[in-house]
Every structure is written in C-alpha cells, then in structure tokens.
Image: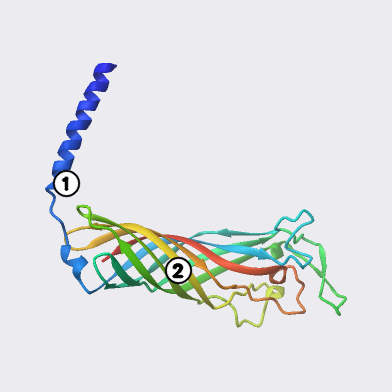
Amino acid sequence: MKKILSLLAIFTIVFSQAQWKTNFDREDKNTIEDNKKLSYGYFLGFNYFDFKITPDIEGNYGIDQYGRFTVESEGKIGFSAGLMGKLRLNNYFDVYVQPGIHFTERTLYFNHIREDASYPHPAPSTELYTATAEDSIRTLKSSYVDVPIMIQVHGNRWFNTRPYLQVGAGYAMNLQSQENNTDDNGDGIFRLKTHGFNWQVEGGISIYFRRFKLTPSVKGIFFMNNELVPDDPDTVPIWANSLESLQTRAIMFSLKFE
C-alpha cells in the first residue's frame, strides 16, 4: 500500500511539473480581442424563471389560518438568445450591452381554491362563484425582450482563460403580458405588466481560442417592479386580488461567442 501511495505521489509530482511546463510555454491566443475598443458577439443559453410572491395580508385569501402562503410558483427550463456589444474602458473594466430574448413558462398554484367551493363576489354583489378544477392553476407563458447594460471587471489572463464578474441594470418588455386584455382571471386570463426593470449579476470564465473567445457564464436576474395586474373590481378576489405583488426572479446559464 505504501509503495502504491509513493508511486502515486511521484506520478502526481512529475505530471504537475510537466503540466506546468506545458502551460508556461503555451502561446496566448486571440490577444487582439482584448485590445479592441469595440467588439461584438452573441450568446445562447437556458434559463429558469420563477416568481417572488407577496400575498395580500389584508385579504381573505392567499394566507391560510396558520399564516402560511397558499399561492406557489413553479418554473420550467426556457431558452435565451441575444447579441452583445462591448466597449473597452481599460485593462480591467469593460461596458457591455446585451440585448436578448428569454422564452419562459411559469405556473401559479392557488391552493386555497377548492373545486366546487363557492366564493362571494365583492360587495354590493350577493352572487357566488363556484370554482372548477382548472381555477386553481394558471399557466403563464412569457417572452421577455431584455436590454441590460453591464459593467464588467476582470482579472489578468491566466494563459488562455480569464475570470470576470459583471453587474448592471436592464429594461425588459414582456411580449405576452396580457396587460391590455379586457378579460381577467374570471375569464381564465392572468395578466402581467408589459414593462419591467431589473438588476443583474453575472460571473464566468472566458476561454480564448485562435479565432474566437468562448465564455460560459451564470447570470441572476431580479426584477425591481411589481408585475401584477389586479383583476377587475367585480371579479372574485381569489386570484390576482389575493396577491400584493409578483416579481420575476431568474437564473440563466449561457455560452457567449465573441
């Protein structure tokens, strides 16, 4: 056993020295890219969008008798794509504009809604609404056109890689928001606001090849505004009117090509 461990240790030392020598002699690739004042590229990736939910604590729904939230959100894996433009500031800072589009789908579960249960309409109406099985679920498909402006800080190149971190803010337009739809949840339509603002943080490692730069990255997107559009005043308050706010939260993994 000691002989095996000794051989493994010797092999590790020899391999490490050989690897270091190989890396030390390695040619830096695509060095012109770093010094360009303006450059561009594109990205492809996968996203996961969800909601931060705040219930209406003054309402009769959204919170049960034990103080627990009764509305839940579930996201699905979506697709993202877009373009990039870079303005070089100096050896350590760049400004990026990254317009893109995110296709996503989320489901809201209203666990306080029971099939065949009756719910009163707002006063002065005395009518009752009888819920169906479909009333407890709302599926929201969204297509966000997102335009963030990011400040990137990066370290020195280590052979043909370079880590970076960037933060910024963006404007987003939801092309499937249904904000201007005259129907609401009483007709099966859950509405969101079309326009939104967010802040973003991203980290990754750029890998340099001879003809291009490949960057795997992970980004977080956090909306600052309330995207919820209330239901009409005469609609039973078991859907949108049981909530105070909805704010998008998202994580995205992407591959950038420059």
Question: Which residue appears farthest toward the right when viewing the image?
Answer: 126
Q: Nearer the viewer, residue 16 or 233?
A: 16
Which comes before the other along the chain, label 1 or label 2? 1
Question: Where 126 falls versus 26 (above or below)?
Answer: below
Looking at the image, which residue is at 24% across and 26% down?
Answer: 8
Looking at the image, which residue is at 50% across and 74% down?
Answer: 197
How many dots with numbers? 2
For the residue carrying disc 2, how many other residues have a C-alpha within 10 Å: few (<14), some (14-19), or many (20+)?
many
SS label for mark 2? strand
> Percent position (x, y) of residue 194?
54, 78
- Amino acid under label 2? His
244 to the left or right of 51: right
For the residue carrying disc 1, how many other residues have a C-alpha within 10 Å: few (<14), some (14-19), or many (20+)?
few
For the C terminus, the image quarter is bottom left
CB under 8 Å between discs 1 and 2: no
**Picture quadrant where residue 148 is located:** bottom left
SS label for mark 1? helix
Residue 102: which disc? 2
